[in-house]
Amino acid sequence: MIERKLLRYPPIVTLTVEFDREEDGRFLADIPALPGVMAYGKTREEALEKVKALALHVVADMLEHGELAETIDSVVFTLPTAA
């Protein structure tokens, strides 16, 4: 008889990144689901990389302090689609 294993998919957190452009040309990346998690960059890509790093630190801190209901195995970042 073949033994069947129940597959367990890891909990995934999906965070949406929003962008804004300041009058001085800097880009601001913001993750509304994590209040205060925002970062500036000279380019959109720089702002994105900075906000992703900050978000991962915040999620890790929340896990460490028991502020999330379950263990998180993956964090996925989504970006707005171009209109």
Image (spheres, rainbow, N blue to C red):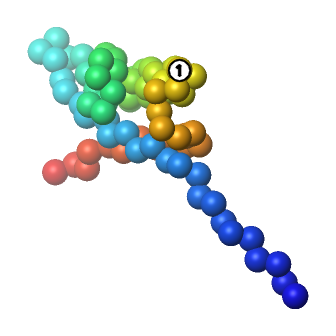
Residue 26 on image: x %, y %: 24, 16
* Residue, disc 1: 65
Farthest right residue in view: 1
Q: Residues within 10 Å of mark 1 (few under 14, many from 20)?
A: few
Q: Is residue 17 above or below residue 7?
A: above
Would you say 5 lies left or right of 49 here?
right
Decide if residue 43 is in sight here. Answer: no
Q: Residue at x 36, y 44 (%)?
A: 78
Outermost residue to the bottom? 1
- Residue at position x 26%, y 45% in the image: 80
Tell me the quarter of the picture where residue 33 sits: top left
Residue 3 rendering spot, x and y as whole percentages: 82, 78
Pick the front one: 61 or 78: 61
Kind of residue indicated by mark 1: His
Which residue sits furthest left?
23
- Residue 79 placed where, x, y %? 32, 43
Q: In the image shown, does 55 or 20 lie closer to the viewer?
A: 55
In the image, 74 versus 65, the foreground residue is 65
Q: Taking 47 as reference, is 4 left or right?
A: right
Residue at x-position 47% and y-position 33%: 68
Identify the residue shown where x is 37% and y is 39%: 15
